[in-house]
Each structure stands twice: as C-alpha cells, then as structure tokens.
Amino acid sequence: MDAILPFPSVEQVHSRLTGEGPAPLSRAAGSPFADALSDALGSVVGQWLRAARAPLALAAGRNDDLVGTMLEVQRASLSVSFALEVRNRLMDAYHDVMRMTI
C-alpha cells in the first residue's frame, strides 16, 4: 500500500510558486509579457494565501468577521477562475497558431 503524503502547507505552496523554494520558476529576463504574467499570477497567489489564512484565523478566534472571511474566499475563488480562463484562452490561441500552415 502506498504511503499517504502530507498535504503541503500554504507557505510551502507559496514558496514553490514564487521561486523561493526548491522548485523555482524560470523567468524570461526583460520580457514585458512575462513580467505582466508573473505579476498577475503573483496577485492571484497572494489572494489565495489570504483566503487560505482567513478561515483559519476565524476558527482560531483571532478574527470574528464571518462576512469578510467569506468575501475573501470568494474573491480568491474568482481570481483563480479568471486565471484559469485566461490560461485556457492562451492555450487555445497557441494551438491555433501551431495548426496554421506556412
């Protein structure tokens, strides 16, 4: 039977996504598109981190704002959904370009 691996913490996921951990992300130097995309993904990751911490703070009693917590979680959900939709559109455009005949 396979061993069950522990679920990574929010900080571990953040360090891997931002390149501070053992699996850094490669970036094209000097590319405005890559910089804009990196900034946008960093914003999504930041919102996701805040949304992951908000229910924990509520459950621990450090925060008593249930509505604010739910808004934070929904805001992060919308950000991730939007990022996935942008990714899908970019992949569709890439596939269209690759199918073009020269």
Image (cartoon, rainbow, N blue to C red):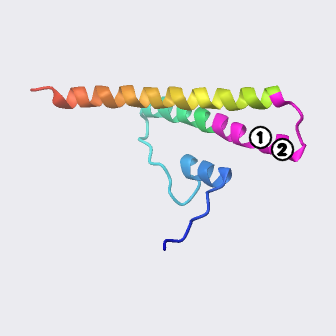
Q: Is residue 20 above or below residue 3?
A: above
The magenta span reads: 46-66
Residue 64 place in picture, x, y as percent: 89, 34
Do labels 1 and 2 touch, CB within 8 Å? yes
Q: Is residue 17 above or below residue 100?
A: below
Q: Position of residue 12 (x, y in %)?
A: 63, 55
Residue at 44% x, 26% y is 86
- SS majority, magenta: helix
Q: Quadrant of residue 69?
A: top right
**In the visual, does 99 lie left or right of 88?**
left
> Quick check: 71 above or below 9?
above
Which three-letter amino acid code belongs to the residue tagged 1?
Pro
| Secondary element at image label 2 | helix
Question: Residue 4 falls in which quadrant of the image?
Answer: bottom right
Direction from residue 41 to residue 87 in the image, left or right: left
The residue at which mark 2 appears reads as 59
x and y percent of residue 13 in the render?
60, 51
Return the residue nearer the eye: 34 or 94: 94
Label 2 packing within 10 angstroms: few (<14), some (14-19), many (20+): few
Determine the residue located farthest toward the front in the rendered image: 1
- In the image, what residue occupies the spot 47% across and 31% down? 84
How would you rate the neighbour count of disc 1 (Cα within 10 Å): few for under 14, some for 14-19, many for 20 or more?
Answer: many
Look at mark 1 in the image and give the residue it sits on: 55
| Vertical arrangement, residue 101 with respect to residue 54, above or below | above
Q: Which residue shows up at 61% across the image and 31% down it?
A: 77
- Give the structural element (helix, strand or loop) at label 1: helix
Instruction: Identify the mark at residue 99; answer none if there is no mark.
Output: none
On the image, the x and y values in percent for residue 3 come to 54, 71
Compare residues 27 and 48 and report the one nearer the observer.
48
